[in-house]
Image (spheres, rainbow, N blue to C red):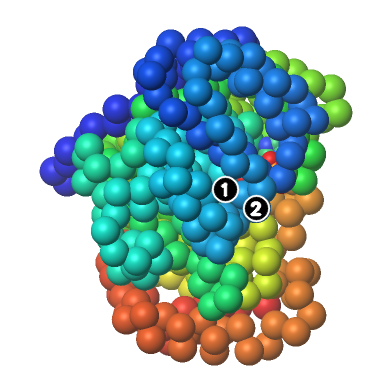
Amino acid sequence: MLNFEFKNPTKILFGKGEINKIAKEIPNDAKVLMIYGGGSIKNNGIYDQVKQTLSNHELYEFGGVPANPEYEVLVDALRFIKEKNITFLLAVGGGSVIDGTKFLSAAANYKGEPWEILKKSVRTPEGEGMPFGCILTLPATGSEMNSGYVISRRETNEKLSSGGPGLFPQFSVLDPEVVRSIPKNQVANGITDAYTHVLEQYMTSPSSADLQERIAESILISLQETAPKVMSENFNYDAAGNFMWCCTMALNGLIQKGVVTDWAVHAMGHELTAYYGIDHARTLAIIAPSHYRYNMEDKKGKLAQYAERVWGIKEGTIEEKAEIGIKKMEEFFHSLHIQTKLSDYVEDYINTAERIEKTFTERNWLGLGEHQKITPRDVYKIVEMSY
Ligand code: NZQ
Ligand code: ZN
């Protein structure tokens, strides 16, 4: 097992009605900015709940953060924060709203031009971000219990990430009741995103970190088992709760400790969102199968272990099991009505591989993956296999 440090300071408030406790988590004299997205919280009652709970706080609001949060919108929020001397941010939404809030937390005290934080991936040290809390409305990204974020810039078609230990939420409310109002295509996205987060930290070389591997496998199995229940029209509170906690656990740092991690699927996937606006999770389902087939030699031990332990495949050679593992993964995505080829989403895709190869070369992203050896040329081939 590799050496590691682990600190995750986010307090989780899990369960029905926990939103009502947030007033105690935010200082009484704070000037609070509630940040939300396109308005789903006004339709499902969460907006009213927050307003009521914080009725004794000085509360301002900023709505309209779009999916794949846009820099252009966030700079308006930043101006507002400075004008009103806001001291505490409250994200009420999915990964996009939480990521947008993290960027604002990082930018609030940053001296230079805010885009620099993303362009140069400037990390925010402990104690330097503006304090913030989250009310999660869409289980998926894990952003509610980690310190990373991803921001898009429309005018340049860029989607870049940053983070740092100063950007953990102070608290996050995980109330499974919010799952009631989520459209099924977003539930499917959430399952797929969380599932791929586990894969990025697991599908590398066999390791000696037994516990991390078994936790990763447990999250995958739990997501597989809970998927049909949360995709069903009948709301099931416990299934929603399991789904929610799986998504948080998939990317709160725990399973990546002591092991090498990949993240090349996300790097390529983010480009597909930047170019074509494809939902984040779906870009991962497009890239992951090709990525694992292309890197079969390095990953076959883990792929076979995945087939065996997660899908119960006992027969066959390592290579045969590894291929069955990839097929099972594709079938799982298809069972959620998530398509796994770029051509299922866009018609004019033929230059995509070349464009991503060029972009990664320009960014000096010359070695991706757990061994930093996936070159822009390899990226070209993986993306081409995903057509
Ligand atoms: O904007 P509103 O009106 O709230 O509607 C949202 C949005 O349209 C809607 N929604 C959310 N909760 C709902 C709901 N609709 C009904 N009922 C509810 N309870 O769902 C739509 C999608 O929301 P969004 O926040 O965009 O989805 P998600 O949580 O999947 O976040 C995606 C973003 O997170 C980034 C992605 O790149 C993408 O930009 N990621 C962040 C990560 C992190 N910080 O750790 C890791 C991930 O890999 C990912 O890259
Ligand atoms: Zn993701």
Most distant residue in the left direction: 3
Few, some or many residues within 10 Å of mark 1 (<14, 14–19, 20+): many
Amino acid identity at mark 2? Pro
Whether label 1 lies within 8 Å of ligand 1 gets the answer: yes
Observer-nearest of 338 and 111: 111
Which residue is identified by label 2? 66
Most distant residue in the front direction: 83
Left or right position of 75 against 224: left
- The percent coordinates of residue 124 (x first, y second) are 27, 49
Residue 381 drawn above or below residue 17: below
- The percent coordinates of residue 115 (x first, y second) are 40, 66
Whether label 2 lies within 8 Å of ligand 1 gets the answer: yes
Question: Are the two marked residues, 1 and 2, in contact with CB atoms closer than 8 angstroms?
Answer: yes
Few, some or many residues within 10 Å of mark 2 (<14, 14–19, 20+): some
Q: Quadrant of the C terminus?
A: bottom right
- The answer to which image quadrant residue 15 occupies is top right
Residue 268 drawn above or below residue 378: above
In space, the residues marked 1 and 2 are separated at their CA atoms by: 7 Å
Q: Is residue 333 visible?
A: yes
Q: Residue at x 75, y 31 (%)?
A: 42
